[in-house]
Amino acid sequence: MPKCNTNCVEKPLAKGFEKLGRIVGIYPWVFFISPLIISAGLGAGFYFLKDREANDIEEQFTPKNGPAKAERAFIKEHFPQREEFSSLRLYTEGTFASLIAVHPTNILNLNAFEELVKLDHKVKQIRVNGSKLTFSDLCAKKNGKCVLNPILDIMNIFINVNTTINFPWHNGEFTGSVIGGVSKHSNNTIQSAQAIRMFYYLTEDKKNETDLWLNKFIQTLSEEEATDKKISVSYFTSISRAEEFETNPQTVIPLFSITYFLAITVSIVSCMRLDCVRNKVWVATFGVLSAGLAVLTSFGLLLFCGMPFVMTVASSPFLILGIGVDDMFIMISCWQKTKVRAKVEDRMAETYKEAAVSITITTLTDVLAFYIGLMTPFGSVQSFCMYTGTAILFCYIYNITFFGAFLALNGQREGSNRHWLICRKVKAPSPDNKGNACSVGGAYDPETGAEEEMPINILFRKYYGPFLTKPWTKVFVILLYLGYLAGSIYGCLQMQEGIDLKNLAPDDSYVASYYDDEDRYFSEYGPFVMLVIKDKNFQYWEKSARENLDACLNEFELSDMVAKSMTISWLRDYINHGDALGLNLADEKGFMGNLPTYLQRSGLTQDVLICNDKIRASRLFIPTVNIRTAIDEKDMLNFFRNKTPTCGQNMDLMVYHPAFIFYDQYAVIVSNTIQNIVVATVVMLVISLLLIPHPLCSLWVTFAIASVIVGVAGFMALWDVNLDSISMINLVICIGFSVDFSAHISYAFVSSEKRTANEKAVDAIYNLGYPIIQGAVSTLAGVVVLSAAKSYIFRTFFKIMFLVISFGALHGIMFIPIFLTFFECCRDSSSVRDKKDQTGNGQNWRSSNTGQFSMSGKSTNQSRSNYTTDPDCP
């Protein structure tokens, strides 16, 4: 099979980097100071941070072109909100405050009622700061009076007159949404109840005043003393989700300093040497600083450009700090393979030449993985991917400028054999003068002229690699992989979709308490779904048309998600009204002639749109039941959406509820995730085909991508993480990471000069082992503090990144090397022949394709062994 030649990409890139490295080595201060100036200038973009914050939950966490938004536009146009308020007929959630009072046994008692009355009075007396406005001045009104809580009147009669309360309807009032935790008698009267919910709706004409009142409501309820209370109270307002969502970043800001400390510590420890001259402590520190400058610069640039800053972006610096230092490990590893006695500019030229292909292609895969995420219809995903992808790009730029410049400056110190801390010259080690680690330094391997090999590399070459390639170890690894795959597939089958809105608030938020009480006590009855008749030519007065509509309603009521015989229908009531009065409603003239009067008297004018004596549209309300989980919400949405087009005959129908705006995520989350994964996989496969000299091994890259994605998706479901816009970000990310691991281990395998598959696997592991561990640990150090965050979003980010890095590293140093040994055809013997032709038979040579790669696709080049015989000889 002919081998692919990647020199067309590698050679020009390596030559260009070689020239750049030499320039950086000659003028290090220029490349060191310039990024600092650029960062300071673009960092000023943070001045606009407050203006760029985009914390509208609907805008960021619902599909931009979701069907429910078009449905809402239709409702708004045809059924605008009137002065006569009705919460049932709102096309939005409305402006409101709500509280849930809970009693451990039965809230329908005198003591609890008295406390509810006092609480209700306290709420109505809330005044807006600096104003005399109270609830009565800002309330939503009907018939000129504030819309209040009829449940208090019902309770008053129940307690004092000793009557009964029917459930879920009582004297025309729907009690299913205001009385919770109900135990009923056989005749549908309430025996006991644990919770009462009260709503305080406000006008939408005075937004500034109502927002102030709602904030005062939150403050008042938060100060409510629980001592000696018979009831516990949770509360919520229409602005609560957005306000609590905005506080989420504040919960992780203190963790950022810990992350920096961990990243610096891990980098220093991994780069620390006992040699006081070769020690890379300051190099590692400035490598972390380089990643920090990249975040400052990229974020500032995008803020200058007006890019929305969503709360999810607050998790990006943790990831950037983790993966940004991987390029540093590459550069350091390449530097250590250069001859220590050479000039700094020569060492820099060699370092850049060796690192060129690795850091460029792997940066490309990471950046593309994020930019592909811009295809999603969720604003929060787009914002996160834009900020993170751009930051990774700046990490790459600053690594070859700012960090490279400091590496050159550190090389000047090493060249003069100065101490890493005090910069005083120390004696070089010799057989006669070994001294101690503080006064003697600058050791190197006299055979290669490079720095001495690290012990951990010897561990991978002598022990781990040979152990992994033993036959019985391979059997164990295969069984382990099959177990991993079985667990992953099982987890995928358990996956749930959608983000629970309470998870957008911190764990200790009052919002979470309210949602918990709502789920516990008020989940029996769900929303009343609007069924809109859009057909302008629908013959309401014809019996056959009405029977067709009734048949449609009966089809809905056959579902377990719809309450039986509870549909609110103006048409049914109008026909019953006409029959009771003996009105002629069988023809258009009689039907339309009596309709306006009936609608006015019954208060149903908002349900019928009449223009020029024609009904342009009308609506009914279908009650739902047992909508408790995200799966129930998805099933309900799909049921109504799928049933509506086929319901009845020749009717143009539409269903809508304000909650459908958020439920729309269920309709697109799976398809968009699959779309992004497929596109990203194809892009990464093309890149791997350019990188790996054998097409068959490129298919192993695709296999590894699929394997890691299935593993992450399955185990995240087992870790109680739903498939939502947050986890979708991370699934796209894992494509970039998985291709880095698999592509580079495959490349190291096929480019190895060893003769057998087992030897090639050991050689690849020897070159890859430590860099993979370095990169994995540094990335996990960047995100591990998020596990302690009080926000579901940040904890989810940690969970999935932990799975991505763990499974990616596991594939890189265990699964893929073993699988490659089963396919001898993946060896690239042409690379050996090419090198022999270039160097001459029987001559010593050193590989230019050094093939050591770090996690996240960050390769660290390492020199091959010196050969004294023809590599083709047995």
Image (cartoon, helix red, strand yellow):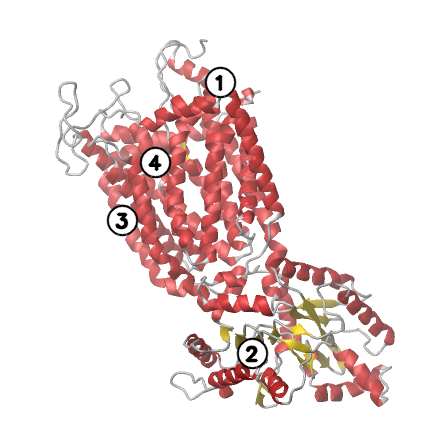
Residue 797, given in percent of the width and then of the height, sits at 46, 51
Instruction: Return the residue nearer the eye: 386 or 284.
Output: 284
Question: Are there few (<14), some (14-19), or many (20+) residues within 10 Å of tag 1?
Answer: some
Asked whether residue 565 appears in the rendered view, the answer is: yes
Question: Are there few (<14), some (14-19), or many (20+) residues within 10 Å of tag 2?
Answer: many
Q: CA distance from mark 4 to mark 2?
A: 60 Å
What secondary structure is marked by label 2?
strand
Question: Are there few (<14), some (14-19), or many (20+) residues within 10 Å of tag 3?
Answer: some
Three-letter amino acid code of the residue under disc 2: Met
How many tags in the picture? 4
Q: Evaluate if marks 1 and 3 touch, with contact meaning CB atoms under 8 Å apart.
A: no
At 53% across and 43% down in the image, what residue appears?
A: 712
Of the residues under marks 1 and 4, which one precedes in the sequence?
4
Point out the image quarter for the N terminus.
top right
- The residue to which callout 1 is attached is 830
Left or right: 303 in relation to 448: right
Residue 335, given in percent of the width and then of the height, sits at 30, 30
- The residue to which callout 3 is attached is 36
Of the residues under marks 3 and 2, which one precedes in the sequence?
3
Q: Is residue 87 above or below residue 52?
A: below
Q: CA distance from mark 3 to mark 2?
A: 57 Å
What secondary structure is marked by label 4?
helix
What secondary structure is marked by label 1?
helix
Instruction: Return the residue nearer the eye: 689 or 567.
Output: 567
Q: CA distance from mark 3 to mark 4?
A: 21 Å
- The residue to which callout 4 is attached is 329
Three-letter amino acid code of the residue under disc 1: Ser
- The residue to which callout 2 is attached is 198
Q: Evaluate if marks 1 and 4 touch, with contact meaning CB atoms under 8 Å apart.
A: no
On the image, which quarter does residue 645 sit in? bottom right
For residue 638, which numbered disc appears in the image? none
